Image: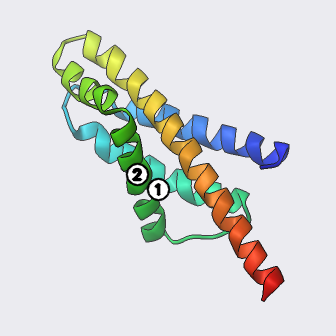
Amino acid sequence: MTDSQQSKCHAIIHSHAVVCGAGNLAPIPGLGFSADIAAMGSMCMCLAAVFGGSITEEVAKGLAIAALKRTLLKHPVKVATKEFVKLIPVLGQLVAPALSVVMIEAAGWTMAKDLEQRAASQCEATVVG
């Protein structure tokens, strides 16, 4: 990943993570996942453009769900805490968005690395073929 690509990815991932954090302010367990999936789909399409690709919204949603699943498997305690803490007044509105931002940042970088690898393999296939 070039410095320019890394800088663009950082801006995209961070801005989408902040949106996900805002979407997790509501004190309703499970509601944040819909905000996370929507923002991750948008983030995926933006990240694909950084690496010279273009993907449909359905493919972006699929990649977003896969990235969230990997994050869930790596950090199950954070995910459970994010949802259960919403039941605690005031504290829930502080902790849940912060955990969401951390998880989306991690999932975003995972997604960026996957998209970079896909772009590199497509480039190699084009050169070889």
The residue that appears at 75% across and 43% down in the rendered structure is: 6
User: Which residue of the protein is positioned furthest toward the bottom in this rendering?
Assistant: 129
Q: What element carries label 1?
A: helix
Q: In which quarter of the image is residue 7?
A: top right
Q: Mark 2 points at which residue?
A: 38
Q: Residue 122's spot in the image, x, y percent?
A: 70, 74
Q: What element carries label 2?
A: helix
| Mark 1 surroundings within 10 Å by alpha-carbon count, few (fewer than 14), some (14 through 19), many (20 or more) | many
112 on left or right of 121: left
Vertical arrangement, residue 25 with respect to residue 58, above or below: above
Vertical arrangement, residue 126 with respect to residue 26, above or below: below
Report, in whole angstroms, how far the alpha carbon at label 1 lies from the one at label 2.
Answer: 5 Å
76 on left or right of 106: left
Q: In which quarter of the image is residue 29?
A: top left
31 on left or right of 11: left
The residue that appears at 55% across and 46% down in the rendered structure is: 110
Which amino acid does the dot numbered 2 rest on? Ala
Which amino acid does the dot numbered 1 rest on? Gly
Q: Residue 106's spot in the image, x, y percent?
A: 51, 36
11 on left or right of 93: right
Q: Nearer the viewer, residue 127 or 48?
A: 127
| Mark 2 surroundings within 10 Å by alpha-carbon count, few (fewer than 14), some (14 through 19), many (20 or more) | some
The residue that appears at 78% across and 89% down in the rendered structure is: 129
Q: Nearer the viewer, residue 122 or 56?
A: 122
Q: Is residue 87 something that shows in the picture? A: yes
The residue that appears at 73% across and 80% down in the rendered structure is: 125
Q: Is residue 26 something that shows in the picture? A: no
Q: Name the residue under label 1.
A: 41
Q: Residue 79's spot in the image, x, y percent?
A: 30, 32
Residues under numbered marks 1 and 2 in contact, where contact means CB atoms less than 8 Å apart: yes
User: Which residue of the protein is positioned furthest toward the left in this rendering?
Assistant: 87
